Image (cartoon, coloured by chain):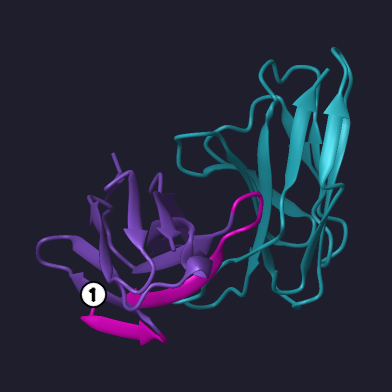
Chain colours: A purple, B cyan
Amino acid sequence: KNQVEQSPQSLIILEGKNCTLQCNYTVSPFSNLRWYKQDTGRGPVSLTIMTFSENTKSNGRYTATLDADTKQSSLHITASQLSDSASYICVVSSYSGGYQKVTFGTGTKLQVIP
Amino acid sequence: DGGITQSPKYLFRKEGQNVTLSCEQNLNHDAMYWYRQDPGQGLRLIYYSQIVNDFQKGDIAEGYSVSREKKESFPLTVTSAQKNPTAFYLCASSPTGGASKAQYFGPGTRLLVL
């Protein structure tokens, strides 16, 4: 069964600090891995997307890494801001027959405090 | 929210009533999706459509119905057969023809049962 597990479930950090969120998956066959940011009561917004051959990808203060051998990914947030408070969702896709089947993690809820 | 609109933002359903959630996109995407989000769970796929006049059941289609008469529109009807409809509903779209295609999400509709 395809699964995506994220840790920690929730995290509180001080403004300006860095943090790292983890994602482990058992999706097969692997196509790509995405990190989304979801503000409370809003739809998710894509931060990064990585395919099998990519080890790291950055989007401003967000840097995602992927280890396809161990089936692990991390999202590193540098110099956190209050606006980073949100849920971060790891999504892993399989692709066959022209259609993506996506498996969503349950998310890590990040709270950045002053 | 990437050119996808959902309405209404909040919807109240009475027992035994069917309600329809609207989803419209102007991104010229072929594929559209409906997900349900419950607290503490990852997004779960209800229905998806890869092309106009065609749609497929997702993992939790029971009690829901959809139509795809136009490329831009993918309405979801929550029928009286859905016994636990209270949730946050998210519509998404994506281009087809490649594996590395991120899904763009709408702002969501929160459905509550009276």
Looking at the image, which residue is at 60% across and 51% down? A40
Q: Secondary structure at mark 1?
A: strand
Residue, far left: A69
Work out whether B30 lies above or below A92: below
Q: Nearer the viewer, residue B104 or A10?
A: A10
Residue A29 placement (x, y as % from top left):
27, 59
Left or right of A59? Residue A17 is left
Is B82 colored magenta in this rendering?
Answer: no
Q: Quadrant of residue B49?
A: bottom right
Q: Nearer the viewer, residue B79 or B112?
A: B112
**Residue receiving disc 1:** A65
Q: Is residue B99 visible?
A: no
Q: Quadrant of residue A28?
A: bottom left
Looking at the image, which residue is at 43% across and 59% down? A113
Residue B6 placement (x, y as % from top left):
81, 55
Q: Which residues are magenta?
A: A40-60
Residue, far front: A114
Left or right of A34? Residue B25 is right
Question: Which quadrant is the N terminus of chain A positioned in?
Answer: top left
Q: Nearer the viewer, residue B85 or A85?
A: A85
Residue B9 placement (x, y as % from top left):
82, 47
Looking at the image, which residue is at 38% across and 82% down? A61
